[in-house]
Amino acid sequence: MLPNRNALAPRNDPQEDDAQEDAVDTRSKTRRKRDAEALQALGERLVELKPSRLARVPLDERLREEILTAQRIQARGARRRQLQLIGRLMRSADAAAIANALARLEAGALTVSGDAAPGPGK
């Protein structure tokens, strides 16, 4: 007798979570895809941060670990897969709070370093 297929599945399967979300999600497939791509792009911006700045962004521990892992990956394909994982994890994170913290960091970096756009007449 073969073992139950579900017994072999990992408990925290991201694909299972996505399937459950899709079952109750009323947005169009195109809209869900755009939202997922936006979260992945936000994740890519987080990967570009230095660890000291990343520490100022409100992230759960797993997401923070995966971002730090992505920063160490050099192979293009592996990095792409890692960014997709980060995008998936971002779905359950507070994306608005992360985006706000990132915007504050980027705005602060421009004014502190003196790289802000010149005013009129300069």
Image (cartoon, rainbow, N blue to C red):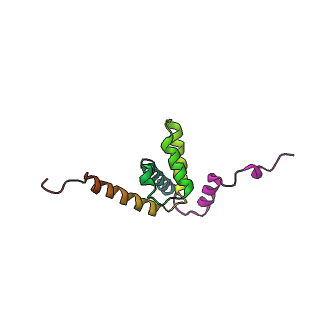
Q: Residue at x 37, y 57 (%)?
A: 105
Q: Is residue 121 visible?
A: yes
Q: Which stretch did the figure color magenta? A: 1-29
Residue 64 included in the magenta stretch of the image: no
Q: Position of residue 34 (x, y in %)?
A: 47, 54
Residue occupying the far right of the picture:
1
Q: Position of residue 45 (x, y in %)?
A: 42, 50
Q: Residue at x 60, y 64 (%)?
A: 24
User: Which of the two residues, 70 or 96, is positioned nearer the viewer here?
Assistant: 70
User: Which of the two residues, 58 or 88, is positioned nearer the viewer here?
Assistant: 58
Query: Residue 71, relative to residue 99: is it above or below?
Result: above
Q: Is residue 41 visible?
A: no
State left or right for residue 27 relative to residue 122. Answer: right
Q: Position of residue 71 (x, y in %)?
A: 48, 44
Quadrant position of residue 11: bottom right
Q: How many marks?
A: 0
Q: Residue at x 45, y 50 (%)?
A: 51
Residue occupying the far top of the picture:
75
Q: Position of residue 22 (x, y in %)?
A: 59, 59
